[in-house]
Image (spheres, helix red, strand yellow):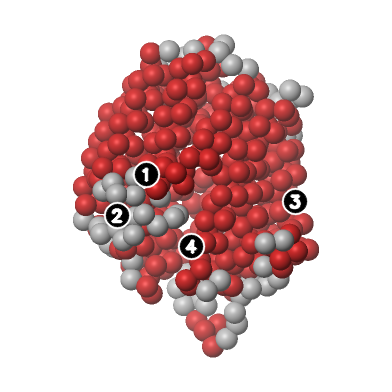
């Protein structure tokens, strides 16, 4: 495919947005805790709360704004959300103190609540059902590349100052806004169903999914497993800084290394584990994750950090693709989008609770997140394996 053909297809343009969105997140996230502590005057115990505000804005806004692209159209919503998130990142570079930073992060979360779902909706609008997997795979690959590029760019920007990473994130999102404005057509199909757009909004639309006990148990255990993993992004930069092992730039390179591993090895790992049962993958992932926590407990040296980050990446490769497949099997065709919205709510809850709990544990003792992480991963993995055993996951060997 040539470049001209790529930019003529709305699905590929939408997938390209994930590259810039992931770059924007990756530039600033590894350095946010250090910036908050050193430049913004935020106490360590409050850093996790600020991370929670970032996800909390999404969680609060999703019930109100989740379906707005069905009423206003995909293009204006994407344009407003990319401009809003980009402007919010730019404002962060001028923030000082807990209150101002929390307010801006909540605002960013509100705009970001409609960003990812609307990009996926654009792909679904224009791609035949039998080709959606290919286009979603393209989006995932571009997102992985963005997660690798982002921390590397951030590592360069912090050489100037920690607050400069927010300028880099803002530029990435504003470039995404320019792509939407210049290249992306409106893809919403208007017709007879338009009169029913407001029939179900907010949490009322999620009730059928939330009443499914199988889904609830699966998502609860998955959220606990992911919660412990979220401590890595939040706590590891603080732990490394306290030990003096790596500079802020070195922290960015460490996260870049993990992203590159995932981008390069995800497909081979998926193929190699195609015959594994869902329970086997979850338990293997948990064992690798607990080993990573054990390595961090034993040492904070450079070799230990590389080994631990490799383990974290491998654990994510094992377990990551399972949940969408399981939820897809639980949902009837007419409720599939509703079930996926419930997954989004669960992810937002994890993103809210995880960083806050991780930094609070770190404030008590530097090793406490890793000590608590081992039993939490074990319990969550056993529960998730049990929940997955009740769900028949079709075509596990298919690409995701």
Residue linked to disc 4: 133
Q: Of 132 and 189, which appears nearest the observer?
A: 132
Which residue: 75% across, 64% down?
4
Look at the picture and state if 241 lies above or below 112: above
- Alpha carbon of mark 3 to alpha carbon of mark 2: how far? 38 Å
Q: Of 58 and 378, which appears nearest the observer?
A: 378
Q: Tag 3's secondary structure?
A: helix
- Alpha carbon of mark 2 to alpha carbon of mark 4: how far? 26 Å
- Alpha carbon of mark 1 to alpha carbon of mark 2: how far? 30 Å
Tags 4 and 1 touching, CB below 8 Å: no
Q: Is residue 395 left or right of residue 358?
A: left
- Which quarter shows the C terminus? bottom left
The earlier-in-sequence mark between 2 and 4 is 4
Q: Tag 1's secondary structure?
A: helix
- Alpha carbon of mark 4 to alpha carbon of mark 1: how far? 20 Å
Residue linked to disc 1: 272
The earlier-in-sequence mark between 3 and 2 is 3
The earlier-in-sequence mark between 4 and 3 is 4
Residue linked to disc 3: 175
Look at the picture and state if 351 lies above or below 377: below
The earlier-in-sequence mark between 1 and 3 is 3
- Alpha carbon of mark 1 to alpha carbon of mark 3: how far? 37 Å
x then y, percent, for residue 185: 71, 71
x then y, percent, for residue 62: 51, 58
Tags 4 and 3 touching, CB below 8 Å: no
Quarter of the image for residue 254 reads top right
Q: Tag 4's secondary structure?
A: helix
Badge nearest the viewer, 4 or 3: 4
The earlier-in-sequence mark between 4 and 1 is 4
Residue linked to disc 2: 216
> Is any atom of residue 264 visible in this view?
yes
């Amino acid at each position: 495919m040539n470049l001209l053909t790529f930019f003529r297809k709305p699905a590929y343009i939408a997938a390209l947005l994930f590259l810039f969105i992931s770059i924007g997140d990756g530039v600033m996230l590894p350095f946010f805790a250090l910036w908050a502590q050193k430049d913004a005057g935020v106490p360590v115990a409050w850093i996790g709360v600020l991370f929670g505000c970032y996800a909390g804005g999404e969680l609060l806004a999703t019930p109100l704004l989740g379906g707005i692209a069905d009423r206003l159209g995909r293009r204006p919503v994407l344009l407003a959300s990319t401009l809003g998130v980009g402007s919010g990142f730019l404002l962060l570079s001028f923030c000082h103190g807990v209150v101002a930073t929390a307010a801006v992060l909540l605002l960013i979360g509100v705009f970001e609540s409609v960003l990812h779902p609307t990009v996926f909706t654009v792909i679904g609008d224009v791609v035949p059902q039998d080709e959606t997997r290919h286009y979603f795979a393209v989006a995932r690959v571009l997102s992985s590349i963005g997660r690798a590029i982002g921390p590397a760019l951030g590592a360069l920007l912090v050489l100037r100052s920690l607050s400069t990473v927010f300028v880099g994130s803002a530029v990435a999102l504003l470039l995404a806004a320019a792509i939407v404005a210049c290249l992306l057509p409106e893809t919403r199909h208007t017709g007879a169903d338009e009169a029913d757009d407001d029939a179900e909004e907010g949490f009322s639309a999620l009730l059928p999914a939330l009443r499914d006990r199988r889904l609830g148990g699966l998502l609860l255990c998955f959220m606990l497993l992911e919660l412990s993993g979220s401590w890595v992004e939040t706590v590891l930069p603080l732990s490394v800084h306290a030990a003096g092992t790596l500079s802020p730039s070195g922290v960015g390179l460490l996260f870049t290394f993990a992203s590159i591993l995932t981008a390069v090895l995800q497909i081979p790992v998926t193929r190699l584990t195609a015959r594994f049962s869902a329970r086997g993958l979850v338990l293997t992932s948990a064992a690798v994750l607990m080993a990573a926590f054990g390595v961090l407990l034993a040492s904070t040296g450079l070799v230990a950090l590389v080994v631990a980050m490799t383990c974290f990446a491998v654990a994510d490769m094992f377990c990551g693709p399972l949940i969408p497949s399981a939820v897809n099997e639980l949902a009837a065709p007419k409720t599939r989008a509703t079930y996926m919205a419930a997954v989004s709510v669960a992810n937002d809850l994890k993103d809210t609770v995880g960083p806050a709990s991780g930094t609070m544990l770190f404030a008590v003792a530097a090793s406490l997140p890793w000590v608590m992480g081992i039993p939490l991963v074990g319990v969550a993995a056993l529960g998730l394996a049990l929940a997955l055993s009740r769900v028949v996951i079709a075509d596990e060997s298919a690409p995701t």
